[in-house]
Amino acid sequence: MKILFVTSEVHPLVKTGGLADVSAALPAALQVLGEDVRLLIPGYSRVLEKLENKRIVASFSVFPGQPEVKLLSAKMPDTDVPVYVLDAPLYFCRVAGPYQYELGGDWPDNAMRFGMLSKVAAMLGSAASPVAWRADIVHCNDWQSGLAPAYLHLNEDVHAKSVMTIHNIAFQGNFDRDWLEPLNLPQSCFDMHGVEFHGYLSFLKAGLHYADRIVSVSPTYAREIQTTEMGYGMQGLLTARNGDVSGILNGIDENEWDPATDKHLSARYDSRDLTPKADGKMALQQRLGLEVKARAPLLGVVSRLTYQKGLDMLLECLPKLLDGGAQLVVLGSGEADLERRYQQLAQRYPGRVSVTVRFDEALSHQIMAGADIFLMPSRFEPCGLNQMYGMHYGTPPVVRRTGGLADSVSDASLEDGTGFMFDEATPAALYRTVVAAIDCYRDLPRFHSLQLNGMRRDVGWRASAQKYIELYRKIE
């Protein structure tokens, strides 16, 4: 099959979250399984800088009145997966992030930017393809490519089938209806059986309505988003399309995330010998100015600092945990109030708390390896990758039983346990579970067994990629 994987970010070219990791690993896994898969990504400045051996394969106009764009062709670093880059400098060659400017607001023309990405994706899956290659399947990811299924559906020619993956239904890409005309969408599609969502043009709604199949990034999340509590207004549509909705759990890139070969670690190890993990803990404590104590329980957090991630609940637990002898390392950024409160915590507990408010790829790997217990108390979590990184690195996670966390982690009370789980989204439930994790950490044989269970769990992409192929074949 010819599969076009459409995404707004991909590691290592541009990354704001887990979508970038998935966008790198899943296409590579599909290629290994013999499929002809190609990426389509926007030509952000950093993408153009990092990709080598780019060549122009087409020049064309996407929308009336808009400047001509170029389609570049290259290969992804490391994997050699072919990638098409939409080179539209007016819209993508900007300082700051892919979705927001430096002060944190959304780019005001995001509708045009990602409408253009969606339209080009649809062109590559139709007779209007500007290159000889034409997709059989257009696989869209989140709202940024959500208009592609609409453009394909509105195309009278024979065209590709479409798959829409929901990585987080809370982000919907809702814009004023005045964007219909610039995006070359007919007024007739602006109703509840089209792109309209509470009076707005919704990119995600368009994808969910017009795509041939809908996939969420875990089986549990596929059920959760069909409820009023977690559907963010889309639950009615998803329930009506229940037969077209499925959940396929994400995997992790085991080439990028492997404690035996990780280039970011000074002490590498595997499930046959975890002894060097202690050296990694000491190196992490030294780097971050923590007291070097081999048996102090070191709790790790690598996350966006947001309400969704439950990190406000964690703040309420931490004084008792730290006063009890635990240490904490936090890496991430997000809501200003949470950033401030975590930084204040670090000032209150020098030598026991380290908070780094930014993203640091190397440090994220070092925390996964050096921490004893990984904390991920999300209120909701479509899939999550960090809990799988933690298990793979012998750092059992504490997670809430929701979404992909419920599907990927087994509780320590079970024979095949890999982590610690709680149900109620309350500080008290979280505190009890972290205390239980620390108690387990002090029981060396039991904790070692938990570590080995996690490290031996298959969390790679091969099985999930095969499920995607089976899905594609059903609709091709």
Image (cartoon, rainbow, N blue to C red):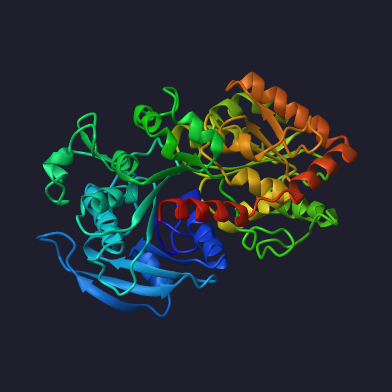
Estimate the x, y position of residue 446 in percent, counting from the top left. 87, 37
Front residue (pair 329, 404): 404
Q: Please indicate, yes or no, whether residue 324 appears anywhere in the rendered image.
A: no
Q: Is residue 265 above or below residue 115?
A: below
Estimate the x, y position of residue 246 in percent, counting from the top left. 49, 40
Front residue (pair 81, 34): 34
Front residue (pair 62, 370): 62
Front residue (pair 460, 242): 242
Q: Quadrant of residue 355?
A: top right
Taking the spot 71% from the left edge, 32% from the top edge, the residue there is 420
Estimate the x, y position of residue 421 in percent, counting from the top left. 68, 30
Taking the spot 81% from the left edge, 44% from the top edge, the residue there is 293
- Which quadrant does the C terminus fall into? bottom left
Q: Quadrant of residue 275?
A: bottom right
Q: Is residue 436 above or below residue 408?
A: above
Q: Is residue 142 above or below residue 80?
A: above
Estimate the x, y position of residue 160 in percent, counting from the top left. 33, 58
Q: Quadrant of residue 169?
A: top left
Q: Please indicate, yes or no, whether residue 296 appears anywhere in the rendered image.
A: yes
Task: Name the outermost residue toward the left.
Answer: 65
Task: Name the outermost residue toward the right.
Answer: 445
- Which quadrant does the N terminus fall into? bottom left
The answer to whether residue 222 is left or right of residue 320 is left
The answer to whether residue 324 is left or right of residue 330 is right
Taking the spot 65% from the left edge, 37% from the top edge, the residue there is 375
Taking the spot 42% from the left edge, 33% from the top edge, the residue there is 242
Q: How many marks?
A: 0
